[in-house]
């Protein structure tokens, strides 16, 4: 496997093996309670959620090559741990992801999907509109963009162009890095989240297979294990 190519295509609309794409359980945005998606426009309001601290050192422990973007093949997409850490912390505050076990699972997932934060657009096979650090499908990126009030005016004229929708999300680092937290809090069931919060491997596997909809393989597990260690999660 080429380490420079994002591994997962799990947010696309076909159902094949790990090397192609696996369909997720798409949940209509209209059916979601409005409370599930807290607008990123509230990001700096301290009363919205408790303070979350994620350090660059923790991110480097999870995604070792994120220490630097020197000599990467797509410099415009690469983000260092110094860039990733505050944006991930803000995302958890915005979407009220306060469980360290959930935080570890999300960080491990987006670090894996973006190849240590080197990419935010799908490279293989190059699906138009697939991206963010969570490597979401165009369908989920549209739902995500629709949930952000600050993007409403800009989104309206480009809503049917998946590439331009992704461009809107990537224009602001907060939105780029918050996609994983948004997906967890709006697309995963309460039952999945409850098991994930236990810190157990079984809970993590259920999150990956039942919500993300892909294989909980050893490569993904390695990222999760580094994340739970870096965040001090007690695993069962």
Image: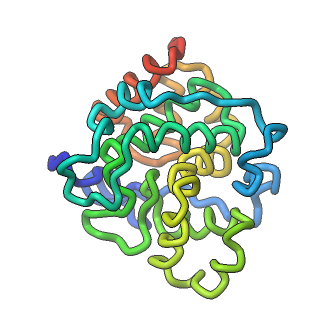
In the displayed structure image, the side of residue 28 where residue 178 appears, left or right: left
Q: Position of residue 125 (x, y in %)?
A: 26, 67
Task: Give the image quarter of residue 41.
Answer: bottom right
Given the current orientation, which residue lies at the most extreme right position?
47
In the displayed structure image, the side of residue 215 where residue 197 appears, left or right: right
Q: Is residue 10 above or below residue 235?
A: below
Q: Position of residue 173 (x, y in %)?
A: 52, 55
Task: Give the image quarter of residue 109.
Answer: top left
Q: Nearer the viewer, residue 38 or 26?
A: 38
Q: Is residue 220 above or below residue 28?
A: above
In the displayed structure image, the side of residue 150 where residue 132 appears, left or right: left
Q: Position of residue 236 (x, y in %)?
A: 52, 12
At a point 67% along the width and 70% down the height, the residue shown is 151
Q: Nearer the viewer, residue 75 or 145?
A: 75
Q: Nearer the viewer, residue 43 or 178?
A: 43
At a point 35% along the width and 41% down the height, the residue shown is 112
Q: Is residue 3 above or below residue 73?
A: above
Q: Position of residue 111 (x, y in %)?
A: 39, 41
Observer able to see residue 91: yes
């Amino acid at each position: 496997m080429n380490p420079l190519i994002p591994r997962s295509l799990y947010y696309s609309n076909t159902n094949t093996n790990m090397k192609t794409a696996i369909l997720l359980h798409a949940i209509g945005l209209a059916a979601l309670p409005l409370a599930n998606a807290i607008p990123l426009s509230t990001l700096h309001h301290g009363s919205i959620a408790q303070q979350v601290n994620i350090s660059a050192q923790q991110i480097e422990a999870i995604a070792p090559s994120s220490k630097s973007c020197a000599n990467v093949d797509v410099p415009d997409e690469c983000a260092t741990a110094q860039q990733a850490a505050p944006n991930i912390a803000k995302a958890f505050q915005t979407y009220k992801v306060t469980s360290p076990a959930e935080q570890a699972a999300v960080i491990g997932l987006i670090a894996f999907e973006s190849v240590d934060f080197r990419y935010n657009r799908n490279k293989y096979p190059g699906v138009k509109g697939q991206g963010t650090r969570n490597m979401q499908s165009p369908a989920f990126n549209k739902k995500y963009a629709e949930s952000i009030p600050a993007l409403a005016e800009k989104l309206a004229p480009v809503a049917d162009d998946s590439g331009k929708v992704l461009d809107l999300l990537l224009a602001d680092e907060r939105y780029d890095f918050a996609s994983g937290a948004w997906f967890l809090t709006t697309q995963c069931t309460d039952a999945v989240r409850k098991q994930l919060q236990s810190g157990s491997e079984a809970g993590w596997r259920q999150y990956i297979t039942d919500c993300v909809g892909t294989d909980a393989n050893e490569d993904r597990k390695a990222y999760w294990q580094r994340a739970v260690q870096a965040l001090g999660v007690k695993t069962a």
